[in-house]
Amino acid sequence: MIKVQNLTKKFGELRAVDNVSFAVEQGDILGFLGRNGAGKTTSMRMITGFISPTSGSVLIDGDNVFDAPQLVKRKIGYLPETPPLYLDMTTQVYLEHVAHLKGLRHRDIKREIERASDRCGLESVRGRLLKQLSKGFRQRVGLAQALLGNPKILVLDEPSSGLDPAQIREIRKLIKELAQEHTVILSTHILGEVQRICNRVIIIHNGQIVANNTIDKLSGNDEDSRHCRVSTVANEKAHKILKDQAGIEKISIVEPNEVFDLVLADGSADYRSALLQQLIEAGCPVTEFQNMAPTLEDIFLRTIRGDIELEDEDELEEEDELEEEDEDEESEEEDESDDQEDEDTKDDEDEESEKEDDKDDVTSEKASKESEEKKEEKEPEQASKADTSSQQQSNKKKKKRKKRKK
Ligand code: ATP
């Protein structure tokens, strides 16, 4: 139904979307998942024909969005991240306006507005000004405008963004209902949203697709999906029953006679229900059974982790290089200042010895006392010098970093 081929969008040097290809079948609810700036919105704007790609194509039922925009756009309802509302219009007037813009036939407009308003629960606010509506209702109006003309495809950019938990739940329920009649592509960075609503997921990272699969397969492909934990009422037989049970590859005892972690054998058969039945029949009632399959969040983070770690490492390396450069520069500066200090000390010593020669009447005891006192005075002085110099060094470092950042 939708075929995206080698789609690329460059903004200057930035490849916001980089050679992306995927297909969406009729009835799919595809979740576009990615961190901020991953390229979700840019992809959606190209799919809906709002911006043109640098290269690549988008085909809807075989028609290219950019060669036959009017024909294709009739098949797509688009809800951008910020719904395009004219806040001084009432809901009714706004929907009429959009219906005209979409080129709906005059005799269909009333029926279409009724249908879309009904679908999105807008009956009570049709006469109200959009600026007076809550964010949740504005989002519903945004969805209703996307539904006008009954397009086969709905493209929804972060449809639950900025809504409160109750509104999010309502919008999700609505999207699920709409998905029964429309093919839906929705973008989000809420992983739970994808897991609850979608059957397929594409993970996009730095403009590239890093995963594209059904949610079941994405979790099922992972070997961790065969892990489960079973807790029984304390019973010595439990371990033996599990050991004799077919289809268990590995058993680890978490609590003797009570809690066991299992790795089920690979293969199509699902041993879970047989296992539970076996335990119960043998008089080991199961108090808890937990699939340890990874969540979408685990999969998402694992998929993009390499890059996150690399980014962190790059930063650390850069930081280390800066430190080294700083140290080199500092040691050069220190050498210079050491030379200066040596000369100063030499001058001081010469002066001292001249004075000493003049003071013949000063006893050696007094002289040593004075020298002790001088030493005591000098130590805190040196310490404070050291503090000041380390403060200066850290200030210097900060300045250098600032300069480099600039
Ligand atoms: P978010 O979840 O934050 O909305 P996203 O995945 O939708 O992010 P995009 O909006 O597609 O990300 O942006 C992808 C990259 O392209 C970002 O680095 C963004 O700054 C850049 N970008 C998007 N639109 C433009 C533009 N018109 N001009 C320049 N750069 C842009």
Image (tube, grey):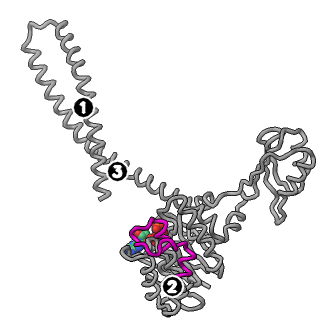
The stretch drawn in magenta includes residue 120: yes
Tell me if I can see residue 165 in this picture. yes
Left or right: 365 with respect to 308?
left
The image quarter in which residue 180 lies = bottom right
The residue at which mark 3 appears reads as: 325
Q: CA distance from mark 3 to mark 1?
A: 24 Å
Residue 110, position as x, y percentages in the image:
51, 86
Q: Kindly identify the amino acid type of the residue bearing the numbered disc 2.
A: Gly
**Disc 2 residue lies near ligand 1 with CB under 8 A:** no
Secondary structure found at label 2: strand
User: Which mark is in front, 3 or 2?
Assistant: 2
**Residue 131: assigned label:** none
Secondary structure found at label 1: helix
Left or right: 350 with respect to 271?
left
The stretch drawn in magenta includes residue 370: no
User: Magenta segment, which residues?
Assistant: 113-141
* Magenta-drawn stretch, dominant element (helix, strand or loop): helix
The residue at which mark 1 appears reads as: 385
The quarter of the image holding the N terminus is: bottom right
The quarter of the image holding the C terminus is: bottom left
Q: Residue at x 80, y 45 (%)?
A: 287
The residue at which mark 2 appears reads as: 56
The image shows residue 336, relative to residue 171, as above or below, that is above
Q: Closer to the N terminus: mark 3 or mark 1?
A: 3
The image shows residue 15, relative to residue 387, as above or below, that is below
User: Which mark is in front, 3 or 1?
Assistant: 1
